[in-house]
Every structure is written in C-alpha cells, then in structure tokens.
Image (tube, rainbow, N blue to C red):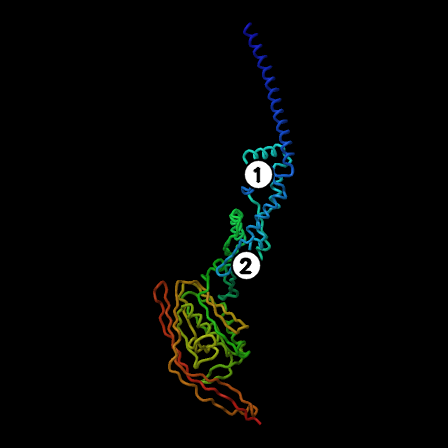
Amino acid sequence: MKQTKKLQTRKKFIIQASKAFFWFATGVMLAIFLLTSFTFFIYEKVNSGVVYPGITINNINVGRYTPEKIEELFVKKNEAIGDTQFTFALGNDVATISAKDLEFGYDQDLIVKQTISLGRSDNFLSNTSIVFQAYFNGINLPPAYHYSEEILNKTLAQFIEKVNKEPVDALFNFQNGKVLAFKPSEEGKAVDVETVKKNLASQFEKILLNQKPQKIIIPIIVKILAPRVTTDQANNLGIKELIGKGTSLFQHSIPQRIFNITLAASRINGVLIAPSETFSFDKALGDVSAFTGYQQAYIIQNGKTVLGDGGGVCQVSTTFFRALLDAGLPITERRAHAYRVGYYEQDSPPGLDATVYVPSVDLKFKNDTNDYILIQTELDPNVQQLLVFLYGTKDNRSVQLTAPVITNRISAPADSYQDDPTLQKGVVKQTDFKADGATVSFTREVTKDGKKIISEKFVSNYAPWQSVFLRGTKE
C-alpha cells in the first residue's frame, strides 16, 4: 500500500517537473526569438540602404556599400579592361573587337540589385539566416557580366555569310532503267554560334580578375549539318558520290549548234550503266536527224565542213570522253576528229576530243566497278560551258594523265576561194576554218589499291585544214 502511494507521488512530481520545463523552454525560446528579432531589427536599421557586411562579389568586398558606390566601383573595373581585344578566327579570316565596343564587363545594374536585395526578402527566417551567415562566414556571389549579343552577331556575320550552307537532301527517281531526277546529298555547314559564345564566356572571369587589357583569341567553330535524306538512303544501286567529271566550252557557237548540244546532252542525262556493262554513246544518243529534233549546224563530212543535222553533238562526246578519263574507267573505243577543232581547245590542250557519227563512229567504255554508274549533264548558259558528271562509288583508283605532246606539225594549206552562184556578187562567206595539222599524244595510268590496272596511250592524228571562202557571183 505504501509502495503504491510512493509511485503515485513520483508520477505527480514528474508531471509537474515536465510542465515547468516546457514553460521554461518556451520562455527561453521566446526570449531568444525576441532578442534575435530586436537584434535583427537594430542591425537592419544600422545597415539600411547599404549591402549587409560580409557580402562579396567575385571576392570583392561590397559590405556596407551603397548602390551608387557599387555601381561606381564596377564601372571603373569595366574601364580598366575596356581595351581588351577579342579576336575571332577561322583560318586566315579574323575579326577583332574591343571589350568596350562589345559592351562587355561587369553588369553593375544586376550586381546592385543582387547585393542590395540579399537578406531583404519577405521571409524573416531566411533573411536572418543570410545576414548571420554573411556576418560570421561571409557570402561570395559569382560575378554578373554582360555583353551585346547584337554586336557580337554583327561581328560573326562575315563568318556566317562565308561558311553557312544548308544541307541538300538526295533526290533519286528512275523509271524504265533511266534516272528521271537525281541530286546527290550534300552536307551543310554552319558557324556554331552557341559554342563560340560559350568559349567567349569562358574567358570573362579571367579577364575581370586580371583587371588589365588582354588579347583573347576565340576560334570560330564550324558544325556539320547532315541532310535528312542521304544518297545512300535514296537508292540501292551503289550510287553514292562523284567519281569523274568532264568540262568543255562552246563559246561563239551559233544558236543551232547550242540547241543541238543541249538536246544531245539531255539524251544521255540520267542513263544508268550496270556493273560489267559496256556503254555505247551512239546507242544512248539514238538517231541524230531532223526527225528526232536536231537542227542543222556545221559537221565534218567527207573531208569538208558542211551544214548537217546534229552539228555540235561531238561537243557532248568530247566532254563525256574527258569525264571517262578523269574517272579512270576503261575506254574501249574512241576516235579523234579529222582536224583540230577550236571549240575543244578553248579550255583544254589538243588531243582531248572524241568524235561520234551515228551509227558508224562510236565512243565506248566498260563499267569495271562493282556498282552502277549514273551519267548527269549540266549546261551553264552564262559561260557557255558543258559539264558531264559520273556518279558511282569510289574504289580507291587514282588517275595520272600526262600533258599532251604535239609532234609532226604541218601548216594549214593556203586559203581556198570558190565561186558560188547562189550568193549575191560581192558577198564572201567562210565555210571552213584553217587549222594546222599535228600528231598529239598523251598517256593515262590508272592504279587501284597500288596495282596498275590501266596503262594506255592516246594518239590523235589531225590533218591540216584550209580555210574555204565562197564568193558570190549572182548578179
């Protein structure tokens, strides 16, 4: 009974002691809160209008600075680095601008806002924590800086204009064994402006800390833009890239000749040659006559230059011959012109021509690659140039052509004048143009994976040619 009474007395004591401790602790906490609040209130009043002590920017003490003093401080620091030179470089192309012209430096307005507002939010506990942390341990804020993006973009404009190129999607449509539309894919390029800006920004802190003019080189980074549709995706014939190219000029050609060149080029454009197939230029060209749309222009026939259907077709065969030479493909049949034709030497030495005369004189080659070959033709009317492109897949072959050697030169015969009763008297018309005769030769060697696969010599025997003039005799 006595033991029960003792337990009840002890329990009552514990309850009373707990209540006393609770109220004591509450009072202490309330006192601390009131003291802290009072202290913070006094501290806030003492530091009214200035940055709280212990706050630094990039380790620069701004404690108890007024907004005006902070602004003045960082304006002076910007002036100290105003002559810093930023040089943007891409190869030999450079563009230089000063920090002042770029409007680069500390962002004094933002720094003022950041520092003066620190510890002055609507959250009392947060403010108290920040103020005490700054006072006892210090708070170091990262620097805020700025530059003019508009001025930077103008500085980079010269690189962007020179470099930027949109990617080209592949186009490959064919029907009945002939390509109707083809365009190989091309990668695009663009100045990586964002990376350039990051590289520029990475230099800012170092410049600001040094507080003296410097010379900074920022490389221009170029990124590759992939096409959405590559040549590989557009076809499954192994036609991936350019393997050969031929060019020729036809300046000063009469309109009828230009018409025939355009027509003949269109007839071989888009032709596909299968692996191991022998290509015949005559077969691809088809009939050359007025019935198939050709106009009359000068051709060589029976030892004379005369008007005939399809004059100018040999401009196309000559250009095609040059593309075959460039591609390193085996040429199984080729014949030179009877005499040196001025058109074919406008952008080339003599000996790089090929004549055709359907169906007896042909130009042939064999596709000895493992993939299809596609012929594409293009005319540039501005410079009067014909281009022939051969597309396929490169197989590590390389081509070496020697410069043509001219021997056995023979001067052109004297001019010939012939009476023509169909022309009015006093009218003189030239129908043939003189050319010196010569033998022209060059060699071609083609190697593949270090092994010689073609070694040949092309010889062209050009006869001397006289100028022929018709004199009118018609009264």
Identity of the residue drawn at 40% across and 85% down: 410
Amino acid carrying label 1: it is Ile
Q: Position of residue 190 (x, y in %)?
A: 53, 57
Which disc is residue 240 wearing?
none
Q: Are marks 1 and 2 in contact (CB under 8 Å)?
A: no
Looking at the image, which residue is at 62% across and 43% down? 69
Q: To which quarter of the image does residue 424 belong?
A: bottom right
User: Residue 160: which disc?
Assistant: 2
Which amino acid lies under the numbered mark 2 shown in the image of this protein?
Ile
Q: Is residue 338 above or below residue 398?
A: below
Q: Position of residue 399 (x, y in %)?
A: 39, 68
Would you call the spot at circle 2 few (<14 residues within 10 Å), some (14-19), or many (20 or more)?
some
Q: Where residue 13 sits: x, y (%)?
A: 58, 12
Q: Looking at the rendering, which quadrant does residue 137 occupy? A: top right
Q: Determine whether 457 is above or below 470 in the image.
A: above
Query: Can the viewer see residue 170 in this picture?
Result: yes
